[in-house]
Image (cartoon, rainbow, N blue to C red):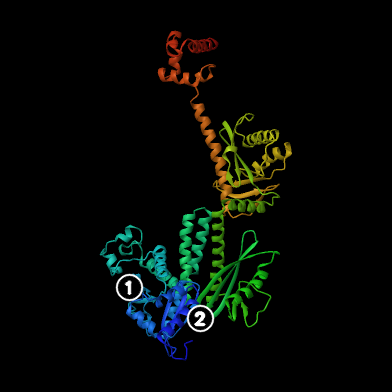
Amino acid sequence: MASTKKETKEQRLERLKNIVSSMPEKPGSYQYYNENHEIIYVGKAKNLKKRVSSYFLKEVDRYKTRVLVSKIEDISYTVVNSEEDALLLENSLIKKYNPRYNILLKDGKTYPSICVTNEPFPRVFKTRTINRKFGTYYGPYSHLGSMYNILDLIAKVFKPRKCNQIITSEGISAGKYKPCLEYHIHNCMGCCIGKQSREEYMENVRLIKEVLRGNTRELGEWLFAEMQKKAEELKFEEAEELKRKYLLLENYVSKSEVVSYTIADVDVFTITDDDANKIAFINYIHVKNGTINQSFTYEYKRKLNETDQELLLMAIPEIRERFGSTSKEILVPFELDWKIRDAAFIIPQRGDKKHLLELSQMNGKQYKFDRLKQAEKLNPEQKSVRLMKELQTKLGMEKMPYHIECFDNSNISGSDPVAGCVVFKAMKPSKKDYRKYNIKTVVGPDDYASMQEVVRRRYSRMIEEGETLPDLIITDGGKGQMDCVREVVVGELGLQIPIAGLAKDDRHRTNELLFGYPPQTIGIDIKSELFKVLTNIQDEVHRYAITFHRDKRSKSALHSELDDIKGIGPKTKEALLKQFKTIKKIKSLTIKELQESIGATKAEIIFNYFVNKDNKSI
């Protein structure tokens, strides 16, 4: 407070500097008071101490600043969590107190709004001029970045026109308009040339208005689901773009609550568990006077296998005390058998409060997603361990499946039958351990017998050589393949290696994981990251076996009688075929002609081979 005793200018400045020296280096809003203790200026700052100190530097030479400083008798400040919160608070205080030196912000039009025009084909754009006859206005927006981001989101999702033409249905029918560049670069659907009907366009405008009003649940849920889908498909760039849009939408949703004023003062708590159920992510949102002014997510490690209800009951008082919340309503996702002084737990079923609860849940899930992604970037092995543990849990295995082997056969109507075995360690291919097999004991197309031969050879040799056996065998097929592998592994070799199978549907698409004896379908989401890894293993063994079979058939196609002559190598064969073109021509050569080409010794071997072969055929 200002001193009641008359001060000199130097004493006043020294006192104010002492106030500034104790200010925190945090974002917030500051207020200057005159001798009547009236607020004469409200400002905002990323760093309160640094910003307010700048007013009292000797080198300040702006006349208006010097005049303002000469009127300051006292200073107060409010710390907030972000620059954006400081901006909102500054604007709120300016509107409330109308400070003398805040000329630019007094009229409430400093911040731009978004306009949706009343035209037959409405446009959407930012403006600082409000004319209610021209269209519907949303805002104003305190944070320009947020406004541009929501406009960008609307442009990318709904693609409204950006041109300034006055477009009518009659003009479109008459072919009056030509498409602009925005249409050609796919930023507009071409309503001006009838490529998009007015009904479809106006439906998009309706959705745009819903987004701008804050009714964004459906769009938010869709973006969140698509983001998770792309992440599960390992399309991280697309997931990141969707995440960006989702966060922008979420940011806008929180700001849209400011203009609705439907909720006075509530706390919101939700809980999200990690996949191992060891860590809980508790999100807290505080709403004051219709504004979401706090949103944080905390991690709680379970020590005694506490339930979600028990964790929330422990967390709520701690978080409320930390933020000094006195809200009379606490929104929670489920019933809590507990009462708190001067507040009531509410499970909202509909409306804005239900929407707030959903927003809190999305924040918790997003935080979990981000933490997992960050952790796996720092430690790529963590992802492998997570997937192995997930598979172990799904299959009920005693040991984590670090070493996985998968088999597949390949032949065409029984010709050139081969098989392949691929090895994955820590969910990654270990190509040095891959093995190829020529089928030796099976005649004709018999996949089961071929599989049994390969499995028998593979694990008999591993036992003889003392190699480490796999933790899990996966067959490229259903119950039949699993049973035939089990007959060898368990029945003949006496090994207790778990066996799983990946079965396909009628359209030859892998659709289920089988395990156990007798084989049972394991409940696993075919869109999950784990299922994608398993199908990658299946695709890899299929590729490996097919490639081996193709190579073998290629060699068979290139086989000639020269390959059957002992003592004649590939270079000699190549030289003869290059010079004489065909086997028939080589057979017709005299021994002298052969000697001139490849020397006496090899010429005699080849000449005698064909002479003896011809004599046997007579």
Q: Residues within 10 Å of mark 1 (few under 14, many from 20)?
A: few
Q: Amino acid at mark 2?
A: Asn
Per the rendering, the mark at residue 302 is: none
Above or below: residue 128 compared with residue 452: below
For residue 530, say whether it is visible: no
Measured as percent of width and height from the top left, residue 288 is found at 52, 79
**Which residue: 51% across, 81% down?**
289
Above or below: residue 240 compared with residue 4: above
Depth check, front residue: 531 or 508: 531
Depth check, front residue: 39 or 114: 39
Work out how far the residue at label 2 is from the one at label 1, CA to CA, in angstroms.
35 Å
**Which residue: 28% across, 70% down?**
166
Q: Report which residue position mark 2 lands on.
A: 289
Q: Secondary structure at mark 2?
A: loop
**Which residue: 55% across, 11% down?**
616
Q: Report which residue position mark 1 lands on.
A: 119
Q: Quadrant of residue 541?
A: top right
Depth check, front residue: 16 or 170: 16
Measured as percent of width and height from the top left, residue 314 is found at 66, 72
